[in-house]
Image: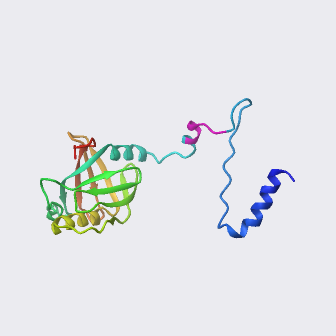
Amino acid sequence: MDKACAMLLFGSLLGGCQATPAPAPAPVAVMPGTSSQPQAAELQQAMPAPSGALATVLELTRHSWRLATATDAGGHRIAALSARPDKPLRLDFNASLVSIGGACNVISAHHSAAADSLLVAPFNSASAPCENPALAAAGAALALRLQGRLALRFEQATPTRLILVNAGGDTLAFEAVDSAPGAR
């Protein structure tokens, strides 16, 4: 029995133990005299990012974002978000997570970016005790305002501004801060 047949037989015997077989990879055309392994450029072209999403993620991850202003749908300042005016809350992004910094605990959630919007899952928080109840409340209030689909835009100013608007009409403006250590 050849190796392929043995693997097929072994796989069928285990079929009842596996949830769902993984789909076969798409065939890759191989030119004579070349490797059958796809090159990095081919892999990048296989699953293109939605238009503008990559540029948005790159801009989000380039900086920390310090809360500059927060207003509700009526244009009134959201006082609950400024427990420490000298050290405002901030957002830090990586490719899949957004974290709220400057509160008592680190609060983070998964996000998905598009060119003009940000979808944020519910936030998780560490449950360490907090000596400053206003600071804990500010972090929780920001997390509530950042959940769901947010309209997103960047304003080219000095420093660059990130503007997020939630479904309730709250507008949160963040200023880019150099991500270098000590700049936060």
Q: As drawn, which residue projects farthest toward the right?
A: 1
On the image, the x and y values in percent for residue 87 come to 16, 53
Q: Is residue 155 left or right of residue 33?
A: left
- What residue lies at 73% left-to-right and 29% top-to-bottom? 33
Residue furthest to the top in view is 33
Residue 137, image x, y percentages: 20, 68
The image position of residue 71, as x and y in percent, is: 18, 60
Q: Is residue 12 left or right of residue 165?
A: right
| Residue 5, image x, y percentages | 82, 55
Q: Which residues are magenta?
A: 37-43
Determine the image quadrant of residue 59: top left
Front residue (pair 100, 3): 3
Q: Is residue 41 magenta?
A: yes
Res. 21 image quadrant = bottom right
Front in this rendered view, residue 76 or 26? 26
Q: How many marks?
A: 0
